[in-house]
Image (cartoon, grey):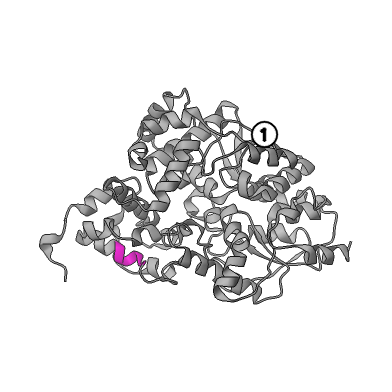
Amino acid sequence: MRYALFLGCTIPVRGQHYELSAREVAKAIGLELIDLEGFACCGFPVKSTSAETAMVFAARNIAIAAEKGLDICTLCNACTSVLTEANKELSENKELREKVNDELSKIDKEYKTGVKIRHFARILYEDFGLDKLKKEIKRDFGTLNFSTHYGCHYLRPKELYDGFDDPENPSSLDKLVRVTGANVIDYKNRLQCCGGAILGVEEDISLKMAKEKLDNVTANNVDALVTVCPFCSIMYEDNQRKIESKFNVNYNLPVLYYPQVLGLAIGLDQKQLGFRLNKVKTDKLLEKLEGKK
Amino acid sequence: MIHSKDLDPNFKYEVAKEPGGANIMRCFACGTCTAGCPVRAIDDRYNPRKIIRMVLFGMREQVLKSNFIWLCSTCYTCYDRCPQDVRLSDIMTALKNIAVREGYIHPSFREQARLVATFGRLYEIEDFDNKKRGKMGLPPVKKTFDDVTKIIKDTKLEEIIK
């Protein structure tokens, strides 16, 4: 299984632990992730300004993968949805495709149909599969309790994702976590949006949205919240201290990227998986795990 | 008070012509969008059902000049649940895109567009960042993209961020 690795803007700068752990896990289980130098922004950040420009950005990236005959593996939910949406519209609408290709011809690129866009977690779930994944597990996570946060664009709009999961009652990430032997703890309003998309517009609303999630997750005794999107993680992890001081609350809730969890479970070292980059310290969780080694 | 003389009856057609805006006139105001909206749950300035009504009434200025059109968190909950397939998240994008062309861009989005147009990504990558990545065993990332800059020059984005 070979994919072009699409990092997007945020992960290589603010989510290196996500990138490190995804690369290490892929290597360990035999997924080949290939770096293509030309990949730039997916287009999401300019969609509110100009949907047409965002479409050209997305098409340009897909064209670069098509040149190499590779499908795309994303790590960020926003990149996943913008690239998938562009891919769907461009493959179904010839007029739009011609218009976008007119733009791309100026830089000697051409959008072609046939490239698949897949989030890393969906690749693990669908292409690699839970059964094969189960065989890779080397450690017992039975003492650990995790809650999951899918992130909106991982599941919605549902027309983009071929029904691989149910956006009103998703289970794919829970199953991926359970493969490790860990328990998945349900919580109130688990589909709630992180609010990351409006952090720069109205910080107050955005932080209140994240606060509700942190309140609901920590109402139970969980060792960490598991995410698959850098925006969501920034809201729950990078902004956790800010939320604590703004609302006079205390969470101390570790937030892990799924490949960090899987990486530990398949026997990789925490150093390889970037645990020192987690802003909320994970020592307690790791100690708990060591006790059960 | 809303006066009919202040309304623009063509506004809904203008929105319908934008990418993703075509279904706006299907709305029968059931309020499923507002009921499930995570932003509305926190701040009632953002009310998707009301925004659609305002567009259908032709309250062009009030909508385009407003702060509330920038508050959609693009979670697509309303989009997936709407019984009339109005595609509200796309309509919010359409409204923002029209507002931008009318000169009402939110500063946060202006800055995002400027960064993306200049560096081809949301963050400026410095040598320091790539050095740090190298130490972690990660490959360097490209700092600028000439072809992206070239495409941007031909789009309206260039004028917007000036």
Q: Disc 1 on helix, strand or loop?
A: strand
Q: Using the rendered view, name the quadrant where residue B8 is placed.
A: bottom left
Q: Residues within 10 Å of mark 1 (few under 14, many from 20)?
A: some
- Check the image and report above or below for B118 versus A161: above
On whether residue B47 falls in the magenta region, the answer is: yes
Residue occupying the point 36% across, 34% down? B155
Three-letter amino acid code of the residue under disc 1 = Ile
Please state, as top left, top right, bottom left or bottom right, where the N terminus of chain A lies in the image.
top right
Magenta stretch bounds: B46-51
Provide residue B31's location: percent of width, then percent of height: 35, 69
Provide residue A33's location: percent of width, then percent of height: 68, 37
In the rendered structure, the answer to whether residue B83 lies left or right of residue B126 reads: left
Please state, as top left, top right, bottom left or bottom right, where the C terminus of chain A lies in the image.
bottom right
Total numbered labels: 1
The front one of A132 and A213 is A213
- Check the image and report above or below for B119 versus A79: above
Prevalent SS, magenta region: helix
Q: Residue furthest left?
A: B5
Residue A89 visible at all? no
Provide residue B64's location: percent of width, then percent of height: 27, 55
- Check the image and report above or below for A33 versus B27: above
Provide residue A9's location: percent of width, then percent of height: 56, 44
Question: Which residue does the numbered mark 1 point to in the structure image?
Answer: A34
